Amino acid sequence: MIERIVIPPNDQYDLSTFTITDDLVQIGHIGGTVNEKGEVLKTIEEQMDQTLNNLEEALKEIDLNLDNVLKLTVILKGIEDFAGMHSIWVKHFKEGKYPVRAVITSEFVSNNCLVQVEGTAAYN
């Protein structure tokens, strides 16, 4: 059986935040272009930090955390942001317990968006 979890704002886009089958969780795209105060974040470091914070908060809704992440695809608007993205990555994941990562580039619907992630997590 497949369980579909929709956490706002994904409900307005007609897609699931997570799909869960057995102990495997597919993570839909998560971004972070604004902070908790609603301020637009302009740097890759700010957006990557907010993206991973948003992912962690969403995972809490299904009783998981970043330690449960198996793989993330990081989607960058520009490859020149790789170093800035990576500097934040190592702050959110424990050394020796990094998830598998792929990095690709893409245009985004929003001009403000510099990074999104999607991937897979699992219940232990």
Image: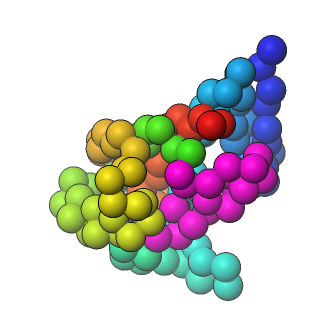
> In the rendered image, which quarter is residue 2 located in?
top right
Question: Can residue 41 be spotted in the picture?
Answer: yes
Residue plotted at (63% across, 27% down) = 24
Residue 81 visible in rendering? no
Q: Residue at x 40, y 45 (%)?
A: 99
Foreground residue, 65 or 48? Answer: 65
- Please check the rendered image and state whether residue 87 is part of the magenta-colored stretch, yes or no: no
Please state the horizontal and vertical placement of residue 34, each as a whole percent of the image: 58, 73
User: Of all residues shown, which one is farthest toward the top?
Assistant: 1
- Against 91, is 123 above or below? above
Q: Quadrant of the C terminus?
A: top right
Q: Is residue 52 magenta?
A: yes
Q: Position of residue 67 (x, y in %)?
A: 53, 52
**Span highlighted in magenta in the image:** 49-67
- Secondary structure, magenta segment, majority class: helix
Q: Relative to 78, say whether 92 is above or below.
A: below
Which quarter of the image is occupied by the N terminus? top right
* Image-quadrant location for residue 14: top right
Q: How is the image coloured?
A: rainbow
Q: Nearer the viewer, residue 8 or 113?
A: 8
Which of the pair 33/60 is nearer the observer? 60
Q: Horizontally, is 113 left or right of 43 in the view? A: right
Q: Residue at x 56, y 45 (%)?
A: 68
Label total for image: 0
Q: Is residue 67 above or below residue 94?
A: above
Residue 72, position as x, y percentages in the image:
43, 42
Residue shown at 65% from the left, 36% from the top: 123
